[in-house]
Image: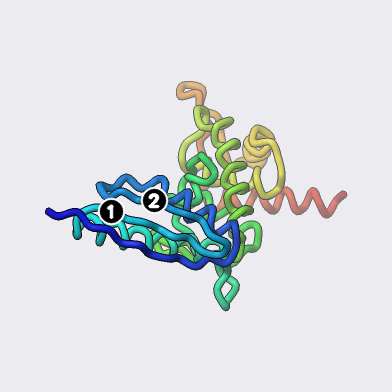
Amino acid sequence: MKAGKKVIMIHVKDDLEKEEIMREIERLNLPAFIYVHGKLNSLKINIQGTKDEIREAMQKIREIQKRVHARLYANKRGFYEYTLDDIFRGAQTTVSAPILLKTLELMGEDVRFDGVKLKTSLPWGEIVELSRRMGDVLSQISLQTTRQIREVVIPVAVVYNLDPEEVLERLMEIGAVEFKEDKFKYELVKNKEQALEMIIKNLEDEGNEN
């Protein structure tokens, strides 16, 4: 097919939005040739390729623009909108969705998750840093814990700023967890919700005593 060319302009709110969009476009692996030129408050994007290649590239770029804007700037209700892929790519780590959601919930953040998009009141930089901290905790306990127990330990360790080993010890002391010698793993005795309730009550009671 005959090669063509298309130039599109994207207006941006600030340098941060410009940099994020440029970074996302650089990650695109498309047959079309894309050249981006940053201006004062806009991006000039040259796309070269066949008609279909150009159409595909334009669609991807528009999706990027929409996604970046939604994650950097809160809507009228005060929510930022993220995809989990974007968060974990930014944090350079991955934790499960239930761990992230429970952590946000324990922090008192408003959270909506439809399985694809996460809407929350926590800004982009903070949710990336939070995910990084959760990833650090996960790396410390992943070999000695089950998936379910991680959904209790990681949110508590991050939100209450505790060492994950201390959280595990506390969970054992209050009878929510036991250590299986034959598996070299900690396992829940109670269900996740009960264990979480017990450890939070334990921490709050201790806080009241102090």
- The x, y position of residue 58, in whole percent, is 32, 61
Name the outermost residue toward the top.
182
Q: Give amino acid for label 2.
A: Tyr
- Residue 166: image quadrant is top right
Q: Is residue 153 visible?
A: no
**Residue bearing the label numbered 2:** 35
- The x, y position of residue 87, in whole percent, is 50, 50
Q: Residue at x 46, y 63 (%)?
A: 113
Q: Is residue 142 left or right of residue 173?
A: left
Disc 2 crowd, CA 10 A, few/some/many (<14, 14-19, 20+)? some
Q: Residue at x 75, y 53 (%)?
A: 204
Name the outermost residue toward the right.
210
Secondary element at tag 2 = strand
Kindly check if marks 2 and 1 are in contact, taking CB atoms under 8 A apart as contact.
yes
- The x, y position of residue 83, in whole percent, is 44, 57
Find the distance from the CA under tag 2 to the CA under tag 1. Answer: 9 Å
Disc 1 crowd, CA 10 A, few/some/many (<14, 14-19, 20+)? some
- The x, y position of residue 74, in whole percent, is 57, 69
- Which numbered disc, 2 or 1, marks the residue that appears first in the sequence? 2
- Residue 193's mark? none
Q: Residue at x 48, y 56 (%)?
A: 21
Q: Is residue 134 above or below residue 142?
A: below
- Residue 48's mark? 1
Q: Residue at x 77, y 52 (%)?
A: 205
Asked whether 208 or 160 is in front, the reply is 160
Q: Give amino acid for label 1.
A: Gln
Q: Is residue 70 left or right of residue 103?
A: left
Asked whether 10 or 127 is in front, the reply is 10
